[in-house]
Amino acid sequence: KMASLTGTCGGPVRIAKSAVRDVSVKVVVRVRPMLESEGGAAHCVAIPDNSTLELERDSQALQYKFDACYDEATTQTRLYRNEIRPLVACVLAGQNASCFAFGPTGAGKTHTMQGDAENPGIIPRVVQQLFEEIDKLKATGQWDFSVTVSYLEIYNDKVYDLLEFKDTDLPIREDQQKNILIPGLIEREMHDCDDFAQSFENALRNRATAATKLNVRSSRSHAVMLIRVTKKELVAPHRMFVAKMNLVDLAGSEDNRRTENAGQRLKESGAINRSLFVLSQVVEALNRGDARIPYRDSKLTRLLQDSLGGDSISCMVANISPSAANFLDTYNCLNFASKSRKIVNRATVNRVVVEKPKPAPAPA
């Protein structure tokens, strides 16, 4: 990407990061509706107010506090408007942002992130809002923009490109400014929502899914969409900003005793659970203030480095089931979500600076 910025600016460039503020990871909880297959199962979740959730068992209740709690009747529109919409404004101002859905298998993460034609999820809504806001800013004559999208999955701890699927495990690298890079990952320019919809639809066909006992269409991989926005001022002082937005649909943690996974499903489950375990270790290390954070122990955590303890404004949507049959999965998810609220990121504005060429040495 640096090469393309260099070409645009007419000289070598660097990204100047200016600190804006310290901001905690925002954590909200979404409770999915009961499924028909769960029949008359008892509820174990109650939401007494907008920021409090109670997990009930044997006439006792554990109480959790979050930034917001959403019950089973919550619409995609309401969740997006309240929690995700402000992040797009941050990206257009040159700040990195992240949103990721976390939770056990079958808890509604993919519905939250992708949705469907009638109830689009966070990803298509972000793109729609992004182009609507860009059109308004372009109409002023002051700004021009470019938007590129990459989409990858981490399957069995290997990174694959979903925009142009090839059976190639892509490497993860870090540049001199500690930015995460993935050589070989397609970065496709998008001009409008139609461009995006076509690429997104094709990419979803490439993502690994399979049936398990608990989920007829279980995601077998973590999916990460990377949206990069470059904002260029057409009038003096001709500023230029670049920001990215990570939209992450994490595969769900699985109890193989309940899913009855075997063979390839068991191997996939092992890789998913290992990466989520490292994610929990990263959260624990950040909360303890450890000198070494184990980002490199998993490809997932390397990609989430900006989102957890980095320079991104981040929002986690913890998805849970209301059924008492899933009490243990819900308990584990809520504990992880509660710990994640303690993480503090250093939000920055990313401005592109064109390096002035050094003067040629005087002739001898």
Image: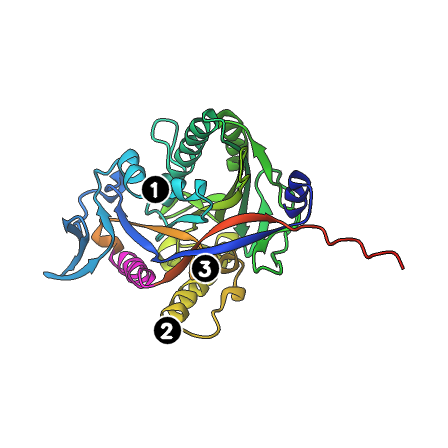
Rendering quarter of residue 136: top left
User: How far is the residue under mark 3 from the one under mark 2?
Assistant: 16 Å
Q: How is the image coloured?
A: rainbow
Q: Amino acid at mark 1?
A: Pro
Q: Main secondary structure of the magenta part?
A: helix
Q: Could you say which disc has been placed on residue 27 in the image?
A: none
Rendering quarter of residue 335: bottom left
Classify the position of the N terminus by image quarter: top right
Q: Which residues are magenta?
A: 327-342
Q: State the residue at coordinates (37%, 73%).
A: 288
Q: Which residue is mark 1?
A: 86
User: How far is the residue under mark 1 from the one under mark 2?
Assistant: 29 Å
Near-viewer residue (33 or 93): 93
**Is residue 208 something one can see in this rendering?**
no
Q: Which residue is mark 2?
A: 288
Q: In screen coordinates, is 180 left or right of 100?
A: right
Front label number (3 vs 2): 3
Q: Could you say which disc has been placed on residue 310 in the image?
A: 3
Q: Amino acid at mark 2?
A: Arg
Q: In screen coordinates, is 348 left or right of 32?
A: right
- In magenta segment, residue 335: yes
Q: In screen coordinates, is 360 left or right of 42?
A: right
